[in-house]
Image: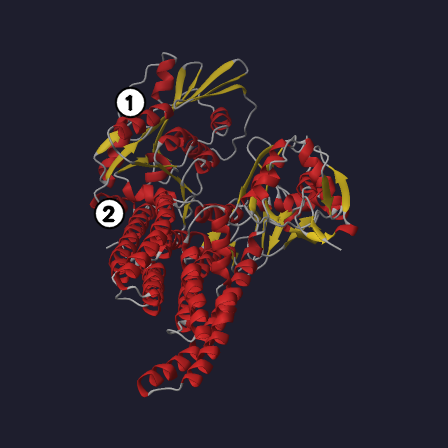
Amino acid sequence: MAKVACTHCNLEFDKSVMIIEKDREDEEIFFCCKGCQGVYHLLQSEGLDSFYDKLGDTTLQPAVDYHDDLHKFDLEGFYNKYVKTTKDGFCEINLIIEGIHCSACVWLNEKVLHKTDGIVEASINYSNNKAKVVWDNDVITLSKIIETIRSIGYNAYPYDASLQEERANKTKKDYYSRILMGVFGTMNIMWIAIAQYAGYFTGMERRFKDILNVAEFLLATPVLFYSGWIFFRGAYYGFKNRVINMDTLVSAGALSAYIYSIYAMITQTGEVYFDSVVMIITFVLVGKYLEVLSKKHAVDTLDSIMGSMPTEVTIITENEKSLVSIENVQVGDIIELKAGEKVVIDGVVTSGDGSFDESSLSGESIPIYKQEGDEIRSGSICLDAVIRYRATHDANNSLLSSIVSLLEDAITKKPSIEKLADKVSGYFSFVIFSLAILTFIGWYLYSGEFEHSLIVAISVIVIACPCALGLATPMATLVGISISAKRGLLFKEASFLETMAKSNLLALDKTGTITEGKPSVINASIKDGFEPSLLLSLVETSNHPVSKGVAKYIKESYTDTQKVPLEDMKTIEAKGIEASYKSRKLLGGNVDLMRKYDIEIDISTQYTIFIFAIDNQVVATFELKDTLREDIKESISLIKDMGIEVVMLTGDHQKSADSVADEVGIDKVYAKLLPDEKAKLIEDFQKDGKITVMVGDGINDAIALAKSNIAIAMGNGADVAIDISDVVLLNEKPMSIYEAYKISRRTFRAVKENLGLSLLYNSVAIPLAISGFVNPLVAALSMSLSSLVVVGNSMRIKLLKFDNK
């Protein structure tokens, strides 16, 4: 019985078992199962039948009915583990789409998802089949999304970072087994080649030479088609997408030598080059294996931060202890930690005290003492006590989860120089392939020797190394991001390393960045009519560091003070707070706030002033001083030594700002700035040709951070500042700003060195190969060595010293 192809999946079956019907043109169409038949009609009804034109002859898995397990995707535990909530209130998940073989599959999945009501965003990465899906849970459920994907013949499951290690190891083992086959074939075929070369000079009988040729053929065949399958597969997909890539070059070179060698072996004319075939495959495969190792290194970076995270925590409910899965922990739950246990959920200590190791987060090896009221962060380890704390985040939104997400994004997003290198690599391969053909024609016309012309052309194909060009940027940025993460610096994208390396102006906020952000009262002037309960009630409504400093002073000086309920609370941007209590008007803030209400103030001081007035009468004045952050003066000096201009942007008054600036060595100070004025200054700097880096920690810095080329936020800063930042300083050390500059500049230098080395190699090696001075063996070895040089040069970034001397 004749076989026919299924109209949907292209798999062939006997016609007798197929479902047969007529299409719109009254022609017979065939389906292997009801699943494929249903998908076909779904695409027709949705106007997506052009999918089959894009699919071509590619085969798919038949559409399978998975409905039995769909209910699990809507379970609360599943949502808590894998689904995040966006700022807009939508749900977001990362899925792995199983069954994607080509760009047509990506196109189909995205089209179908975009046409589905309730789906806000759907984007699929073709390189790793990872899809980001955002949807409105009030309109569509996750199970329905999975069902939609399955209905067109694919499957989907949630992406889990912990499984990335398993997948990377699987790929690594696959390469390892292929390399072993290549090495085995190479070692044995070289012994035969030595015998042949010896026979060439001593006079070997033809029949023995034929036997050795057959032996080489038997050894070279599995090496070419098993070890080299990676290159053939890559060349196939490149051909389907009309792209000539490195895989095309390698497979074309090796296959040409293999086919010619078979011809020479059968006809007993000329020399065979099976040794060149196995050398080409083995040497280049080692280079590809290095790429796998570099990706594995990226996974290891995440694992070093992730560590062996517990999957359960001890929850205290009415003095009863119970083990609960971390996905089921809710904000407000009380969690108990024992000595040696790792924190998996962020929170605030409610009872007990002890030391915590935060080295995996900040790089700081000295344990941090925590007591009641202190924050503890996921990823740290409780060292020496039993602690109970209240959860302030769930598992998906805790610090450690955020860090891993940031690192994943940073590793996958490309800087502009890498995009340029990728583009050049694409053209490069096409140019080399064209040069090889022209070289063959030229040598054949010149010498008339087909064999020699072919070997020279193969050498040109093999010696060219777009691989080194392609590895130049990702290897260097990967190492740079890894070093940064280990030192408590989180670059959200690899591209930010490039931008920061080019920066020539650093703008620093004062409070919370240059200073600790915790000003303390150093002088207080209390007048008649002062009521501490009213002031405490007023300042405790604000999170501003000055308000907190005043609140601390009131609590310590007036221990019996009780808060009272206030009305008409209002925060006045960059000035202070106003409220009312039993028809009495309360004001608390700086001199500008008082002047707004025509309250005359005659104060001259270099410190921050907080004034408290009742019914427009000043009843208390406080002078506050903020302490400088450790090493801020040294770090600014080192940054200035790098040729970077440093300026201060602050909302504080001029005298206070000048005093701090003089102390830390900043020459340019811009004081009394409102948030929008900070942003305007950043824009003015950029108009003057400056590439700006802005460092801040508060809500008032958010606009300026958004406008800057690179925004750096302190790890304990306001959430909005961290959200819009490009780099996060987990350890909040000013010296980390200097280290960020140093790492980014060293990384960018390594990128340029790598590109220079790869271009230099190709500019020398390719002309030598065209001239006939290089044989395929040397070409393959040279190609692999060029990749090793690029990888080795990138690893030199790890030698970067941070002695700050």
Residue type, label 2? Leu
If the image is split into quadrants, where does the C terminus sit?
bottom left
If the image is split into quadrants, where does the N terminus sit?
bottom right
Element type at mark 2: helix
On the image, the x and y values in percent for residue 199 come to: 35, 85
On the image, the x and y values in percent for residue 346 come to: 55, 46
Q: Which residue is mark 2?
A: 638
Q: Is residue 239 left or right of residue 194?
A: right
Which residue lies at the image location 39% right of the left edge and 79% below the top edge? Answer: 193
Q: Please tell me which residue lies in front, 252 or 245.
A: 252
Residue type, label 1? Ile
Q: Please tell me which residue lies in front, 112 or 238.
A: 238
In the image, residue 580 sits, relative to residue 177, either above or below, namely above
Q: Please tell me which residue lies in front, 548 or 225.
A: 225
Please state the total of marks drawn on the protein image: 2
Q: Which residue is mark 1?
A: 603
In the image, residue 309 sits, relative to residue 694, either above or below, namely below
In the rendered image, is residue 307 in sight?
yes
Per the rendering, the mark at residue 467 is none
